[in-house]
Image (tube, helix red, strand yellow):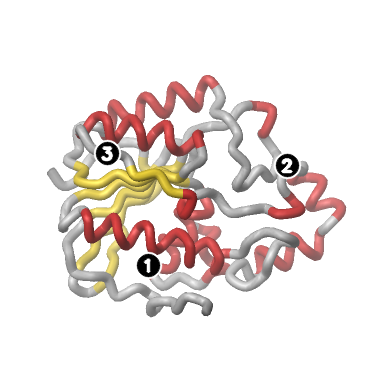
Amino acid sequence: MTPSLPARPHPGFGTGAELWLFRHGEVHADWHGRAYGGMDVPLSERGIADTAQRVRDFGALPFRKVISSSLSRARRLGEGLAEARGLELEVTAELAEIQRGEWAGKSIQKLYETEPETVAGYFADPWSFVIPKGENDRDVFLRAWPAVERAVHAGAGGLVAVTSHYNVIRVLTAYLLGLEPRDSFRIRVDLSSAVALRDEPTGWRLLRSNVRAPDGARG
């Protein structure tokens, strides 16, 4: 049976929790310009350095729960944040990047040149359009949201850190806020940046977007 979807925008739980969604750092240059998606590709030296900086920047925040994608480029940040708070890191494949199927490892420029209709179809309807042998946004939400929901409740109204990937963060943020899937690409989440949302009685509220420092976070 296909899992049921919550209302869009998500009504929230009224816990008061702050949900910090972190994107991993830059990947190795060999993978720049390629559709690696759910492949476990390594960080570049800059990505490693930026990850360490994010741990220094955010490690003092009173996170009560830290969960991470199973892919190493995101897990490295999760490990650092969890260690800084003396927490046990929960690692799950539910938070891995979107599976690119037949696109995996291919040049993005080449895909635009050789499969323009397929690429256009994905961006026009990312929620329903399935990349050949891959995933769409609905698939990503259905597997990622249960992990985030568990973390929010485990955090008992405090701060929760999720270390993951651009498309996971984009899909989750858009759904919680009620944005149309095709408009979700307007959500900017640069490498080594974060989106923060609060679970309020009236639903989820965007606190900060595309940030690399915790200024204004709840203490």
User: Which residue does the numbered mark 3 point to in the structure image?
Assistant: 88
Query: SS class of the residue under badge 2?
Result: loop
Task: Identify the residue at image location x=44%, y=77%.
Answer: 5
Rendered location of residue 189, percent (x, y): 46, 47
Determine contact: label 2, label 3, CB under 8 Å. Answer: no
Above or below, 50 relative to 8:
above
Q: Hey, which residue is sitting farthest left in the picture?
A: 219
Residue drawn at 37 percent across, 24 percent down: 52
**CA–CA distance between discs 1 and 3?**
26 Å
Going by the numbered disc 3, the residue's amino acid type is Glu
Secondary element type, mark 1: helix
User: Would you name the residue on which mark 2 appears?
Assistant: 105
| Residue at 35% from the left image edge and 33% from the top image edge | 79
| Mark drawn on residue 176 | 1
Q: Position of residue 137 (x, y in %)?
A: 56, 64
- Asked whether the viewer can see residue 75, the reply is yes
Front in this rendered view, residue 55 or 140: 140
Between 110 and 138, the one nearer to me in the picture: 138
* Res. 188 in view: no
Q: Nearer the viewer, residue 82 or 216?
A: 82
Q: Mark 2 or mark 3, which is nearer to you?
A: 3
Residue 109, image quadrant? top right
Q: Nearer the viewer, mark 1 or mark 2?
A: 2
Dot 1 or dot 3: first in sequence order is: 3
- Disc 2 versus disc 3: distance between alpha carbons? 33 Å
